Amino acid sequence: MPKRENDSRPRTSGVTRRGLFGAAGVTALAGASSVAGWGVAHAQEDSPSATALKYPFHGEHQAGIITPAQDRLHFAAFDVTTDSRDALVELLRAWTDAAAAMTAGQLVGGGSPSPYDAPPDDTGETQDLDMAGLTITFGFGPTLFEKHGVDRFGLKHRQPEELRRLPHFPADNLDEARSDGDLCIQACANDPQVAVHAIRNLARIGFGTVAMRWAQLGFGRTSSTSTTQATPRNLFGFKDGTSNVKAEEPEDLSDFVWVQEADDPASDWLAGGSYLVARRISMRIETWDRTSLREQETLIGRDRVEGAPLSGGTEFTAPDFALEGRDGPIIPVDSHVRLAHPAHNNGTKMLRRGYNFTDGADALGRLDAGLFFIAFVREPQRRYVPLQNTLSRDDALMEYLEHTGSGLWAVPPGIRPGTYIGQGLFA
């Protein structure tokens, strides 16, 4: 695991942290995926600098995008079950208040005593824990605006042109039960129990207004969103996200992540926000583990130890795609690095916040594991879709991958005190 940087943010005191959260404590959650091995496969040692972190909930942009990527994820998609616009707005208000409280290390409901014969406002499992850098990020799916031709909440005229269901890419094998959703919530933290607690309590608040459609737990970030973070590795053992857009690159953030006011007249409410792309990618772990290191590096286009391009240098050396070897380009034309590089995709970049996952074993006894890919992009239809079409069609690495889940959501801008998430859309 990459060494964590010290942090000077305010910390709470007098709290003992736990570095491991067993799967048995998670599987009781309604709607959560099977998580065999989630707590044990990537145990986190006690680390005050990681667990006492506190990120502000309010701001220009939602937290959980350019925030330094935390180590754990609980992602959930919801379907709205009410036809009442007022009920939906009331839920968003309640979610905003609860998220602000939880990210500040407070109990849902403010911790005030509740009637002894009524359920408590907060489920209580994080009462003795630090905030662990918790961030909660909300998104709105295309079906919130229109579903089966019905303008559900009078929002159709404000649906951004870019907010369209992702197409079926070559070689996709999507499970509808793991795809799409009217709303999404991304909870990230350095403690799995803190992330799970956030989704659990928000789902509880939403009972009767929304229903959880699907959820995914993730451990071990596969991207760095800050230059202060070392590049992590995915389950194939390679460094992932070397060329990721970073928080310290304002021009790239403006060009490739943040929606601009002039992008679409219908999406003025989204200016300062972004779009969240989620793809559940199953990895054929057993087949990969029997593949030679030479072949693995050829498929990726980088060496495994240092993460340097096969053309030479160090991890951050620019790949030389023109460099020839005895049998053709040193970096093969169907390698992942070449096909995903901005130089071959009209300069397209994105900010990724992916996570490893293990969901036990499949029906054939193989490890059900892979990468839960999350990216924040400014123009998903114009930039992400062409890139993913190229990778799905031409990337030699696809022999070892299968995309089983997919979704796209508009992520509203940050929230000011006294307002609620997405208020600009409903105003």
Image (cartoon, rainbow, N blue to C red):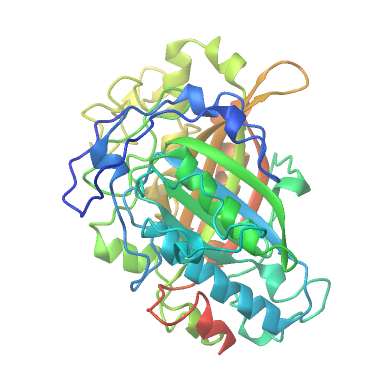
In the image, 401 versus 177, the foreground residue is 177
Looking at the figure, which quarter contains the C terminus? bottom right
Judge whether residue 354 can be spotted in this image. Answer: no
| Residue at position x 44%, y 28% in the image | 20
Q: Is residue 46 left or right of residue 314?
A: right
Q: Is residue 425 above or below residue 39?
A: below
Judge whether residue 359 can be spotted in this image. Answer: yes
| Residue at position x 27%, y 34% in the image | 47
Percent coordinates x, y for residue 397 in the rendering: 55, 29
Q: Is residue 402 above or below residue 374?
A: above
Q: Quadrant of residue 152?
A: bottom right
Percent coordinates x, y for residue 373 in the rendering: 52, 44
Q: Quadrant of residue 115?
A: bottom right
Q: Is residue 169 above or below residue 308?
A: below
| Residue at position x 36%, y 27% in the image | 302
Percent coordinates x, y for residue 284 in the rendering: 62, 23
Q: Is residue 251 left or right of residue 23?
A: left
Percent coordinates x, y for residue 33 in the rendering: 66, 38
In the image, 67 versus 191, the foreground residue is 191
| Residue at position x 38%, y 61% in the image | 63
In the image, 238 versus 368, the foreground residue is 368
Looking at the figure, which quarter contains the N terminus? top left
